[in-house]
Image: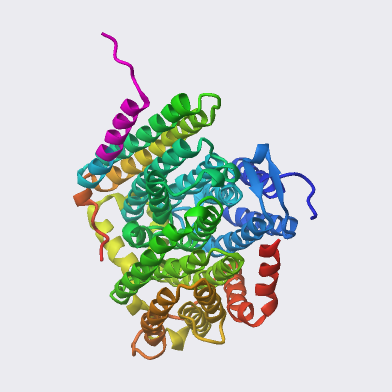
Amino acid sequence: MEIEVHVLHYLVISTVMMFCGIYGFFTRKNLLALLISAELMLNATNINFAVFNRYLFPEQLEGHFFSLFGIAIAAAETAVAIAIIINVYRNINKILTDDISEMKG
Amino acid sequence: MLQFIPMQAEISLAAIMIIILLADLIMKGPHHKTLQTMTCTLMVIQLILNIQPSAGEYFGGMYHCTPVASVVKTILTAGTLLVFMQAGEWISSPDSRHKAGEFYVITISTLLGMYFMVSAGSFILFYVGLELASIPMACLIAFDKWKHHSAEAGAKFILNSMFSSGLMLYGLSLIYGTCGTTYFTDMTANITGTPLQILAMVFFFAGLGFKLSLVPFHMWTPDTYQGAPTAVAGYLSVISKGAAAFALMSILTKVFAPMSDRWELMLSIVIVVTITLANIFAILQDNMKRFMAYSSISQAGYIMLAVIAGNTQGTTSLIYYITVYIVANLAVFGVIGAIERHTLGENYAKADKVEGEHMENALSRSEEIVKSESAVSRSAYAGLYRTNPHLTFVMTLAMFSLAGIPPFAGFFSKFFVFASAFNAGHWLVVFLALVNTVISLYYYLLVVKAMYITPNDNPLPHFRSSWLTRTSLAICLAGIILLGILSSVYGGIETVAGL
């Protein structure tokens, strides 16, 4: 039996990914886990762009281009974020959010 | 319109960036002073080349520059020049003088991102510009590599920025799904206010709200400002905020115009909460940089009052407000930076010998934190009037301008913003914002009181900053006084905004 994959299936996946990312961003304690959650959100949007383009507007390529730019920029962001997290680790030897709470008020 | 080549402002700025990068590579030995002079000169040339408002549409509407956007670019460039002039003393400290070139290149690349952001004609270019403005910003915030406050602030900023761009992109993807295009001009016809589009707009607004630090999304601001180097905090508070505010306004009024009822309600709630909460928290702060962070959150609320009007008067008052805010806030950050530098002066003289190595051991790190904390606390300003009358004078006028006391520019900028929101019919929001202005007067005057009245037996001894810092403070001072008196400034912006 063949199941036809519709635009809705993709959107369910991407929405679940998006909100998993948001949930993870608010609940995780490790800086790297926060980074992964944010990546999850960005990837969910990339799926959205590609799917909308493929199923709703197949005669154009704008959505695909947006996904490409999104992937490239997410990679740049991750590189900078990891560099900064390494610097945090070198300074205080910890990468849990509870430990980097010296500034507050 | 006088324009030699298409996209002249962007191309010349990119050229400046490359020139500085190459100069930094080629020059031998310590060259941070030469580099600063060179960068400031090049920025002045950039200002002169692009002083004439230009317009143009290239790459099939992807890049769409209006005369207003061009004026905003000029103002942002002038603000960046002021920041460069003030940054000299911090960048020549032993910890950071070997990376002076990086500082200028990274800052100019964020400025280039803001250029693209304000003159984008499509969401793709807008997103690329926004990220070009915010990714290097994280590097700038984490610039003081051996201070772990700086690293902590950088981590908080980059993670929040990723989270907010995730939210914004999700909104953009939903808009793309309903409209089938990413170009602003084609999009308006397809925006009808369906529930999906409202959801998309809220996501988009939340994403930009993070960049502007409006209240439900402001949590990163105080920590980031406190941890970032003072010059960078000043840059972050005015330049990037101004660019984001103008971009938000042009997108809300261009793309989301058919849904204006929806976003006006949302904005008015956000404005009232932003101004009120930020004011309450600002009263509680003792650290000057944290205090300025909360002050900048509440100023962002006032800027949003211009957005809510959404017409030509709103655009004019927004740009005028940004201009006045740039000079006043940079004056404050300039004074904070100068005082911080000279309090930490002895500390740095010692660090010169050990070259940052001692920063790694835990004991001296806590000492360093205590020292750098006390250099920016309000108590360090007590009795400053007796030893440093000029700095005190600049700071006082800047505080008066930020609070909106009549003869200074801050009063007129607040007045125009209130007037535009009032004319658009949002009188309740304007009333609540007015009440908050009175509250804000209290905490701005706390600083003035500390400098003039609070007794202090050993205030900071008299010192003299570098001539570039003094020039930049003089320009800020002239701006605070003259921008309000010369009505031609507002008139000129209005003419351009009406084009």
Image height of B409 relative to B349, above or below? below
Q: Nearer the viewer, residue B96 or A13?
A: A13
The quadrant in which the C terminus of chain B is found is: bottom right
User: Which SS does the magenta portion mostly show?
Assistant: helix
Where residue B39 sits in the image (x, y, percent)? 63, 54
Front in this rendered view, residue B193 or B467: B193
| Residue at image coords 25%, 62% | A104
Res B1 quadrant in image = bottom right
Give the vertical position of B445 relative to B165 (above or below). below
Residue at 57%, 73% in the rendered image: B473
User: Which one is nearer the viewer's eye here, B193 or B149?
Assistant: B193
Given residues A63 and A42, the one toward you in this image is: A63
Locate residue B198, reporting x and y percent: 40, 49
Specify whether B249 is left or right of B151: right
For the record, the magenta segment spans A1-20
- Asked if the stretch drawn in magenta spans residue B267, the answer is no
Q: Residue at x 40, y 63 (%)?
A: B265
Residue B172 in which image quadrant: top left
Q: Is residue B284 left or right of residue B441?
A: left
**A4 is within the stretch colored magenta:** yes
Say if B207 sits above or below B460 in the image: above
- Which x, y percent locates residue B436? 38, 79
